[in-house]
Structure formats: C-alpha cells, structure tokens
Amino acid sequence: MGETREEEILKRHVKDLAQKSYRQNVYTFSGFLSEADQDALFCIQKDLSYISWTLFGGSEDAERKIVRFGSEQDLGYEEAWPICLLKIEPLLKKFADDLSHRDFLGALMNLGIDRSTLGDIYVQENVGYVWCLQSIADYIKESLDQVKHTNVRVVDADPLTELKAQEPQEEEVLVSSSRIDGVISHLYHLSRSESIELFRTQKVRVNGRACENNSYMLKASDGVSVRGYGKFTYEGLQGETRKGKERVRLLVYRAGK
C-alpha cells in the first residue's frame, strides 16, 4: 500500500522538527499524534537516528502522544512538555446530561481547534479531563461553556491528584500457546475470525506499534492494546494443565477511556 499524502506531510514535518532541534540546539515538539501517526514516525526512525527523541502524552497509558526532539544529555538542560490537563465539569451535576468521551470531544472540536492540539480525553464520574497543548488551554477555558445540553466550566487540573489511575485486574486464561491471536480470542471471548480481523484492520498494537502478525508469540512484559476492547500486559506462562493447555497471566485494563 502506497504512502498517503497525509503521511508524507507528517513525515516531512517530523524530519523538519528533528533538523531544527539538531541545528539550533533546542527542544522541538510536535502536536499530539494519533496511533497511526506514531506508526508513520516509527517508519522513519532510521532517518532520525542522529538525534534523541521521546514520545509522551501526559500519562503513561496515553494513546495520543507528542514527540519531543532533544534531550538533557544532548542539550545540557531540561525543558518541560508544553501540555496541560484541563477539567471540564458540569455547573450543576444534578441536572447534567450523561456525558461521554464523544460528547466532550465533539464540544471541543466545535470550537474550531485542530485535533493535534488535543491529547487523550478521560471521563470520570461525568467529568471530562483532556490533555491539550498549553498554547490552546486559555482559549478552551474561555470558550467552552457547554457540552451537549449541559453548561460546564473548564479549569486547570492536577493529574497527580484528580486523574485516577486505572487499576489493572489480574486474570489468567487457558490457551493452546502464547500466540497473540489466541490470547486475545480467549480474553475477549472472540471467535478466531473476529480476532484475525482485528489484526487485518490494524486494531492491535504491541508495545505501542501496530501488529499485523496474528501469530506473534507474546513475551513477558509485552503491552498489548486492542481498539474497542482495552489493553493488557502479558505477564508470562504460569504453568500447564494435564491436557496440555498453557495457563498465562495477564494484567488487564478494560475499555472505558
């Protein structure tokens, strides 16, 4: 499959950011990248081998991330990520609509801002938390006053105290082997054909990168995300049953973000 115009533009933009950081000895940052954008970045990582770069989206489990070129070791100083967390809460919770991720995203996009200025959105107890570029934060706080039919206020939030970390559940499943498609099928109660379709449509990621190989053998500490279902960390083989089935342990994060 050929490269799309959007992918070509993104790769050129990323290379320009890398060159600017290298030549001027400064940190440079992209906007928030989708998972597909991040795959495009990984495709050109050999072209970026001359410079340090890091991906971060505000929290360790973020899906949308910014790439930062430069490091303290190379540049001699540290620079904070230009992102912040905003809290979008109903003025009167008693009369608020039941608000979803889609509702918060739609309200934000209706402000006319670019999607690349927004990171992940989390919904907790009918309150939305959104990572965004600092450059757009004041505009959002001043302009967003309604989500769906609910009047809201937007304030700065402290991710350490207000954003609850999602706790994984430890689960064990019985599989024929540690092949990724089999583990996904058993964990999410999918047929073999349904599981394979997830790989064909690039909805499975291993350690942050798209995985199209449904026969990939999982290794301890592999992080797997399945769009629409959730994510899990493969902890490894725990033993075998008398019938030869493998018992594997997973740390499972169910979908809900």
Image (cartoon, rainbow, N blue to C red):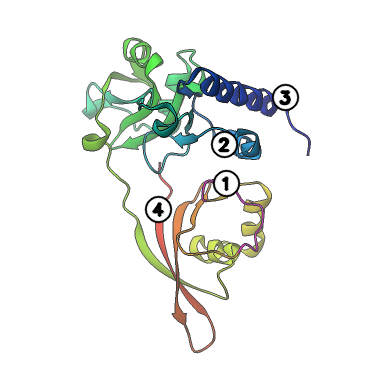
Three-letter residue code for mark 1: Arg
Three-letter residue code for mark 3: Arg
Q: Secondary structure at mark 3?
A: helix
52, above or below 29, in the image? below
Three-letter residue code for mark 4: Tyr
Q: Secondary structure at mark 4?
A: strand
Of marks 2 and 4, the one in the foreground: 2
Q: CA distance from mark 1 to mark 4?
A: 18 Å
* 214 inside magenta stretch: yes
Q: Quadrant of residue 60?
A: top left
For label 3, the residue is 5
Please report the bounds of the magenta region as a residue range.
207-216
Left or right? Give the position of 202 relative to 115: right
Expressed as whole percent of the image width and height from the top left, the position of residue 231 reads 46, 52
| Of callouts 1 and 3, the N-terminal one | 3
Q: Quadrant of residue 153?
A: top left
Expressed as whole percent of the image width and height from the top left, the position of residue 191 reads 61, 63
Label 1–label 2 contact, CB within 8 A: yes
**Number of other residues with Cα within 10 Å of mark 3, as a class: few under 14, some 14 to 19, many 20 or more:** few
Expressed as whole percent of the image width and height from the top left, the position of residue 50 reads 58, 33
| Of callouts 2 and 3, the N-terminal one | 3
Three-letter residue code for mark 2: Gln
Residue pushed farthest bottom? 242
| Of callouts 1 and 4, the N-terminal one | 1
